[in-house]
Image (spheres, rainbow, N blue to C red):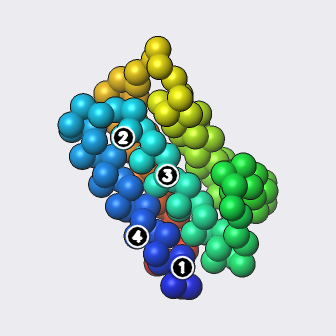
């Protein structure tokens, strides 16, 4: 495994841990953002391992779907998780009238952990 891939996966784990702490502290919107970033770092790690690197979120989203989901390498739910988490992060970061509830954030964190552990195991790491 490439060193940067390892660092991205470690960063994903740290983002999950941060999301859990933020949720415990009642900072749901910030917890949602960290859960999204855990998925984003994981997707970026898988792409980097294939020699692909993107600077924009949209590039990672599209490439993840193109290289891993459309080819049948990964279950489409992981791409859906990433895109839905991105929408939740945008809502949490930029919305002022809506606050994400505990259950919604817990589900984002659960999905982030599922994504990281599944993809890490699939890659044999």
122 to the left or right of 27: right
The residues tagged by marks 1 and 4 sit, at their Cα atoms, a distance apart of: 10 Å
Residue 13 is tagged as none
The image position of residue 59, as x and y in percent, is: 74, 55
Which of marks 3 and 1 precedes in the sequence? Answer: 1
Q: Earlier in the sequence, mark 3 or mark 4?
A: 4
The quarter of the picture where residue 23 lies is top left
| Residue that label 4 marks | 10
Q: Residues within 10 Å of mark 4 (few under 14, many from 20)?
A: some
Q: Are marks 1 and 3 in contact (CB under 8 Å)?
A: no
Please give the name of the residue rendered at 61% of the width and 69% of the height, measured from the top-left corner: 46
Instruction: Determine whether the residue tagged by mark 3 lies in a helix, strand or loop.
Output: helix
- Tell me the SS state at disc 2: helix
| Distance (Cα) linking label 2 and label 4 | 17 Å
Tell me which residue sits at (55%, 55%) in the image.
40
Q: Nearer the viewer, residue 104 or 75?
A: 104
Could one spot residue 52 in this view of the protein? yes
Q: Is residue 93 left or right of residue 10?
A: right
How many residues crowd mark 1 within 10 Å: few (<14), some (14–19), many (20+)? few
Residue 67 occupies quadrant: bottom right
Q: Which residue is mark 2?
A: 31
- Percent from the top left, x then y, of residue 14? 35, 61
Taking depth in this image into account, of 6 and 79 the one nearest to the observer is: 6
Q: Which residue is mark 1?
A: 4
Q: Quadrant of residue 117?
A: bottom left
Which residue is pictured at 40% across the width and 70% down the height? 10
Horizontally, is 98 left or right of 26 in the view?
right
Point out the image quarter for the N terminus: bottom right
> What's the distance in space between the residues labelled 2 and 3, CA to CA?
10 Å
């Amino acid at each position: 495994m490439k060193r940067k891939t390892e660092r991205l996966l470690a960063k994903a784990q740290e983002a999950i841990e941060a999301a859990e702490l933020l949720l415990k502290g009642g900072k749901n919107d910030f917890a949602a953002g960290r859960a999204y970033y855990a998925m984003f770092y994981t997707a970026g790690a898988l792409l980097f391992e294939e020699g692909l690197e993107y600077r924009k979120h949209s590039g990672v989203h599209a490439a993840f779907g193109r290289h891993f989901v459309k080819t049948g390498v990964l279950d489409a739910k992981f791409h859906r998780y990433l895109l839905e988490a991105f929408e939740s992060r945008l809502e949490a970061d930029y919305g002022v009238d809506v606050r994400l509830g505990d259950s919604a954030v817990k589900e984002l964190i659960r999905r982030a952990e599922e994504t990281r552990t599944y993809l890490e195991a699939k890659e044999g790491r």
